[in-house]
């Protein structure tokens, strides 16, 4: 594997990391390695423990986040591995408006007595700091999905560490191009690589990136033990996606910012929420669920689909999911701005919103 120097910018690291050695006849990219077992006596041994296609992806994402990466079958499998670090009965502090799958998993574990959850307003650093006293883990998502609140990672990490709590950040929305939580003091970063990192709506994958070796070893141990391993082909696709992450995100962010400028004050919108960076925008349609659903059904370019972070622009009314928090407005539509021309995206939205 090519060793990536920390002196390079993220844009460069995304291109150079996770390559085979620069030797004659080596391919420029690590191919899809299909192997369930390896000749004994080496470091890989068995396909549940190691795969060169995983390693290539992990090397690249680890270089971007500034830590060591372990990849998983999905984002939710990565989250599960981190929550497993909490000893039985431990307390987890988490944002009220987390990704619904995260809430589902926390509530499931809590209902079976495995842990205790305290939900907080993650934008309220004082509330989070107070809740972290006695906690085992402070879970941060920033920006939150789909409320788009922002957490102060550095301040929360300082407070949590004073209380001996671990700090994990779900960095799916920002990606390491826009936010590197380990540099801000977090211990663990989690990704749904299904979203921006893969970026083409064709692969499910997750990852955990850790700052210290003990956490890396614990996470890797859980993957080998419980088997939530990614497929070699998905790993290949995710690394292929990661190579273009910064250009995709930069274009999508430009378009999101332009859309926010054009949508602010639109008479059919109660609110336009945008955290100032990234390419996710939440709009609240006047008239609630029915008006939002009607607008969604009128769109011809925007795709009605859950998930986000792909080349296609997608949107959905989040409260169509029963698991979404009732504090999210019925008419809130989460926009994932993709790579189509911003004028086309804008015209389609305006037409959809118009009566
Ligand atoms: C989608 C998502 C997840 C879950 O990832 P999967 O790859 O779908 O398992 C976790 N966190 C956030 C913020 C997400 O958007």
Image (tube, rainbow, N blue to C red):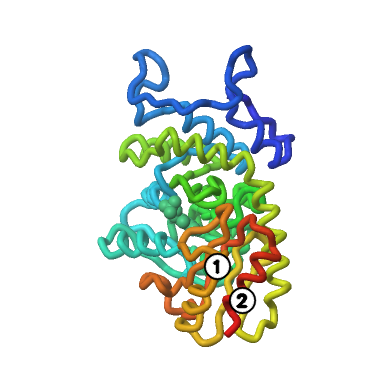
Residue 318 position, x and y percent, is 46, 71
Which quadrant of the view contains residue 109? bottom left
Q: Is residue 93 left or right of residue 187?
A: left
Which residue shows up at 70% across the image and 65% down it?
Answer: 343
Is residue 171 something that shows in the picture? no
From this view, report whether residue 125 is shown above or below residue 312. below
Residue 332 position, x and y percent, is 52, 76
From this view, report whether residue 237 is shown above or below residue 301. above
Which residue shows up at 47% across the image and 47% down it?
Answer: 202
Which residue shows up at 66% across the image and 35% down it?
Answer: 15
From this view, report whether residue 13 is shown above or below residue 325. above
User: How far apart are the alpha carbons under marks 2 and 1?
Assistant: 9 Å
Residue 350 position, x and y percent, is 63, 76
Mark seen at residue 246: none
Asked if marks 2 and 1 touch (Cβ < 8 Å), the reply is yes
Crowd band around label 1 with a 10 angstrom C-alpha radius: few (<14), some (14–19), many (20+): few
Q: Which residue is mark 2?
A: 351
At mark 2, the secondary structure is: helix
Q: Which residue is mark 1?
A: 300
At mark 1, the secondary structure is: loop
Is residue 174 something that shows in the picture? yes
Which quadrant of the view contains residue 255? bottom right
CB of mark 2 near ligand 1 (< 8 Å): no
Which residue shows up at 55% across the image and 53% down it?
Answer: 310
Residue 165 position, x and y percent, is 48, 55
């Amino acid at each position: 594997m090519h060793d990536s120097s920390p002196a390079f910018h993220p844009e460069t690291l995304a291109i150079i990391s996770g390559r085979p050695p620069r030797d004659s006849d080596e391919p420029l990219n690590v191919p899809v390695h299909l192997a369930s077992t390896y000749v004994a006596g080496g470091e890989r041994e068995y396909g549940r423990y190691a795969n060169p296609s995983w390693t290539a992806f992990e090397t690249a994402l680890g270089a971007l986040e500034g830590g060591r990466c372990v990849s998983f079958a999905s984002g939710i499998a990565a989250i599960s591995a981190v929550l497993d670090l909490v000893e039985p009965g431990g307390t987890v502090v988490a944002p009220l408006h987390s990704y619904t799958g995260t809430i589902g998993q926390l509530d499931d574990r809590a209902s079976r007595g495995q842990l205790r959850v305290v939900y907080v307003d993650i934008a309220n650093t004082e509330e989070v700091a107070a809740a972290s006293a006695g906690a085992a883990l402070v879970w941060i998502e920033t920006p939150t999905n789909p409320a788009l609140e922002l957490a102060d990672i550095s301040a929360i990490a300082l407070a949590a560490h004073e209380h001996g709590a671990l700090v994990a950040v779900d960095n799916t929305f920002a990606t390491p191009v826009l936010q590197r939580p380990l540099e801000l003091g977090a211990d663990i970063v989690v990704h749904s690589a299904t979203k921006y990192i893969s970026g083409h709506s064709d692969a499910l994958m997750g990852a955990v990136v850790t700052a210290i070796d003990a956490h890396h070893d614990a996470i890797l141990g859980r993957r080998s033990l419980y088997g939530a391993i990614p497929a070699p082909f998905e790993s290949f696709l995710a690394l292929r996606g990661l190579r273009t992450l910064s250009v995709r995100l930069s274009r999508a962010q430009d378009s999101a910012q332009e859309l926010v400028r054009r949508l602010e004050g639109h008479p059919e919108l109660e609110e336009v929420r945008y955290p100032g960076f990234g390419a996710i925008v939440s709009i609240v349609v006047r008239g609630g669920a029915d008006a939002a659903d009607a607008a969604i059904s009128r769109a011809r370019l925007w795709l009605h689909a859950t998930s986000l972070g792909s080349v296609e622009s997608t949107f959905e009314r989040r409260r169509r999911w029963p698991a979404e928090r009732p504090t999210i407005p019925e008419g809130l539509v989460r926009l994932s701005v993709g790579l189509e021309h911003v004028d086309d995206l804008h015209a389609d939205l305006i037409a959809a919103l118009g009566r």
